[in-house]
Amino acid sequence: MSINLAMAAAVKGANIAHSHTWYANFGGHLAKLMWSIPHVMTIHSLEPLRPWKAEQLGGGYALSTFCEQTAIEAADAVIAVSHGVRDDVLSCYPKVKPERVHVIHNGIDPEIYRPHLSPQTLAGFGIDPTRLAVGGDSAGANLALAAALALRDAGERALKFQLLIYGVYSTDSESPSWRRFGQGAGLNQANMRWIWETYLESPEQQKDWRAAPITADLKGVAPAHLIVGSLDPLLDDSNNLAAKLKAAGVPCQLTVYQGINHGFIRYGKLIGTARRAIADCAAALKAGLA
């Protein structure tokens, strides 16, 4: 709660507040009240649909649900990443008016977003157009790889490097690593199945490269550095992508950090392996852009 107060205070002078996920939603709500500005939320999942957190977090789950509910019912607009998520919002929080809930798909639509690298635009942001890289973790790694593929298909050759951190590169949640490591709290099979069901408009899209970039022809895509934990449900995704990149002649390196699960790189203050992984990623990025 103290972090939410700090976030609300920090947006003084802003014209609008945006928040994403429950741990920031209440900060956006407080900013709306403190500074009389609109609050817009983006939603990809909801606390009432994660009842396993009650066992994991106890009273913390009640607090997270309160924060989400309070913010979403008072928000000026709610943006859901799929029609399924919009339906979930209206079902879980019936006080929310349907006209305030909008759908903007969280992904890449090449019919709308066509890559165009303008040296002048990049220079205006202080970006060296000869040293470009993409990267992300988990779903962000999925989007990074899809962006690299879109750039290649558009004939753009400026991208030099990809930093892909324990990414979800396929829609397969039945792989051996999912069956072995995806049964407990955190990233698990049940949640992942639900995520794909609400994200995709039809089962046929499971093989669309924009959802599952590993299904694409990877030849000619930018070199990549991949990392993953040995206990991550997405371990097979990283192993399979590394193998396919090498088969396509794409330079890549995969590092598997032992004894660690999904999401570990965020905990550099607590986990030594995370600090080592961050240093390794920084070194790989530096070398990739040299």
Image (cartoon, rainbow, N blue to C red):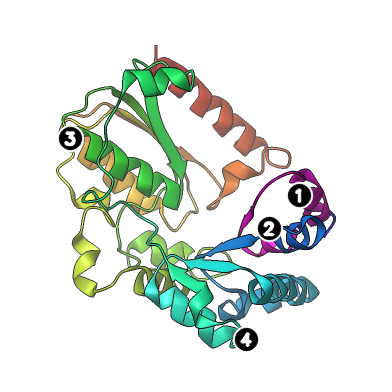
Q: Which mark is residue 24?
A: 2
* Marked residue nearer the N-terminal end (3 or 1): 1
For the residue labelled by badge 4, is the local secondary structure a helix, a strand or a loop? loop
* Marked residue nearer the N-terminal end (2 or 1): 1
Q: Which mark is residue 166?
A: none
Real-space Cα separation, disc 4 to disc 2, in angstroms: 21 Å
Q: Residues within 10 Å of mark 2 (few under 14, many from 20)?
A: many
Is residue 51 rendered to the left or right of residue 35?
left
The residue that disc 1 covers is 7
Real-space Cα separation, disc 3 to disc 1, in angstroms: 39 Å
Cβ atoms at labels 3 and 1 below 8 Å apart: no
Name the residue: 61% across, 80% down: 48
Residue 145 position within the rendered picture, expressed as x and y whole percent measured from the top left: 32, 42
* Marked residue nearer the N-terminal end (3 or 2): 2
The residue that disc 4 covers is 95
Residue 227 visible at all? no
For the residue labelled by badge 2, is the local secondary structure a helix, a strand or a loop? helix
In the foreground, 152 or 79: 79
> The disc labelled 1 sits on which kind of residue?
Met
Real-space Cα separation, disc 3 to disc 2, in angstroms: 36 Å
For the residue labelled by badge 1, is the local secondary structure a helix, a strand or a loop? helix
The residue that disc 3 covers is 154
Part of the protein shown in magenta: 3-27
Name the residue: 65% across, 60% down: 38
Q: Quadrant of residue 242?
A: top left
> The disc labelled 4 sits on which kind of residue?
Lys
Residue 18 position within the rendered picture, expressed as x and y whole percent measured from the top left: 61, 55
